[in-house]
Amino acid sequence: MRKKLAITGNEAVAYAMKQINPDVVAAYPITPATEIVQIFSQYVADGEVNTEFVAVESEHSAMSATIGASAAGSRAMTATSSQGLALMFEMLYIASALRLPIVMPEVNRSLSAPINIHADHSDTMGARDCGWLQIYCENSQEAYDSLIQAVRIAEESLLPIMVTIDGFIISHAMEAVDTFDNKEVQNFIGKYKPAHPLLDIKHPITIGAIDFNDYYFEHKRSQIEAMNNVEPVILKINEEFKKSFGRGYGLFEEYMMQDAETAIVVIGSTAGTAKVAVDNLRKQGKKVGLLRLRVFRPFPAEKLSKALSHLKAVAVLDRSTGMNAYAGPVCTEVASSLYTHSDLPASQQAGKKPKILNYIYGLGGRDIFVEDIQKVYVDLENVAKGEKTEKLINYIGVRE
Amino acid sequence: MRRSKVSDEKKGWKELPIGAILEAGTAKNYKTGDWRHIRPIWNKEKCIQCLRCWIYCPDSSIIIKDGKVDGIDLDHCKGCGICAAECPVKPVKAITMVSEKEIK
């Protein structure tokens, strides 16, 4: 039966995994993701799922075993964070190139050094080129819903997917989550029908073979095409989800954007805080908006640029750095989308794009407050008025 | 490896199976035997049929017939010498390694 539960983000994710009932989970613990698999292994011990649980010796092995299980033809999942994701690095590329629909909850935690266990996006941003789909959730409800959607998205696009929540902020904080009935979840995700399972010994295959320079490029081009075709799949499955369950999520969420003159682009739980700032400023009559980017891979360049091009100024908030002496990863991609997807003909281009500012914040779990975000909108207002050109890179909350 | 040209008779990306999946068992057709520097010589009379060479061979190159060792698959044997190293027969092993140069 449907239940409204008071649970943490990790509990919500583990509960969704229970209802998905994957065939195999191979995992290794790491803070703050450990609880997901810890709770799930209790479900295994209690016989509430039929999952084959494999306790491996490292995250590299976790992803390797998950890849093997998925290639064998099973629904395979794992969960990790930060250094664990980093340790899986080579295997992430392999999972996506082998077109395996692995679903992985990922708890966003900063990468060492220094060792830090708190929330920032450096881990999954570091994996943005590996060919995995990436959905960043604002809260536990979205994480629960998105994980269920993710099974269908992955299996229809035949690409692995990571569904993320901010470490501790969401993973360890209690919220009210509306959950579905076990049967409803099973009906929505359906049965997994693998095209070429290794366990089908009547149709043996070779998987993961070598390519020389005469075919690698063609195989990669094929994989690029797969990623190019994902956007409509996400939207279609969301429509189905909305029909079945009465709520849904798109590629990004537009909050008070319609008549906005300036806006912030943000990913994850900070959007919740930012919406309060928007509400406060709207009460003062300021025309401000918020765009919460949810699907980062594939990057919705065209739709995003359309949603932002009418603005006078945009502040992109990055909870990670690019370490590129330029700008954060979200900023570089948002900014370039406005450049490459402009509707204007070349003759009208000059000076007709929103001014872009990048705010690096929240690294290593540094808190961000409503006041901080309201200050950003003040900067945006100054830039929109043309009063002065602000610096491209700004930092929120770091001691100078 | 000669450089591939666009004009080669090779498949375009649209013709390739997704995930770069291939048929199984293709390694059989790829002969690696010419990589050898030393070659195992199997002595049928000395062999005690313990099958240790077959167990340890990393290239599946010990030929088995009716559950007994029957020879070496020289198309795929890379001459690593593990079979000779593992052979327990004394005082002279049933498998010994000789240089490829000495073979005519």
Image: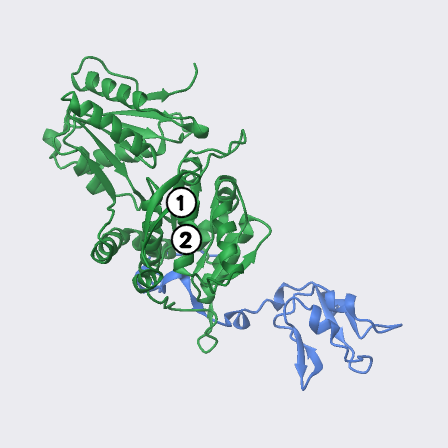
Disc 2/disc 1 C-alpha distance (Å)? 10 Å
Q: Residue at x 57, y 69 (%)?
A: B31
* Percent position of residue A151, x then y: 35, 57
Up-down: is A278 above or below A41?
A: above
Q: Amino acid at mark 1?
A: Ile
* Percent position of residue A66, x then y: 49, 57
Q: Considering the numbered disc 1 on the image, is that residue within a helix, a strand or a loop?
A: strand
Residue lying farthest to the right in this orientation: B91
Q: Considering the numbered disc 2 on the image, is that residue within a helix, a strand or a loop?
A: helix
Q: Which mark is residue B44?
A: none
* Percent position of residue A197, x then y: 43, 69
Chain bearing mark 1: A
Chain bearing mark 2: A
Can you say which quadrant of the picture contains the C terminus of chain A? Answer: top left
Pointer 1 local density, CA inside 10 Å: few below 14, some 14–19, many at least 20: some
Does residue A134 show up?
A: no
* Percent position of residue A45, x then y: 54, 59
Say whether marks 2 and 1 touch (CB < 8 Å): yes
What colour denotes chain A? green
Is residue A163 toward the left or the right of residue A353 in the image?
right
Q: Residue at x 36, y 21 (%)?
A: A396
Pointer 2 local density, CA inside 10 Å: few below 14, some 14–19, many at least 20: many
Up-down: is B40 above or below B48?
A: above
Q: Residue at x 41, y 47 (%)?
A: A130
Mark in the foreground, 2 or 1: 1
Question: The chain drawn blue is chain what?
Answer: B
Earlier residue among tags 2 and 1: 1
Dividing the picture into quarters, in which one does residue A252 lie? top left
Q: Amino acid at mark 2?
A: Tyr
Which residue position holds label 2? Answer: A15
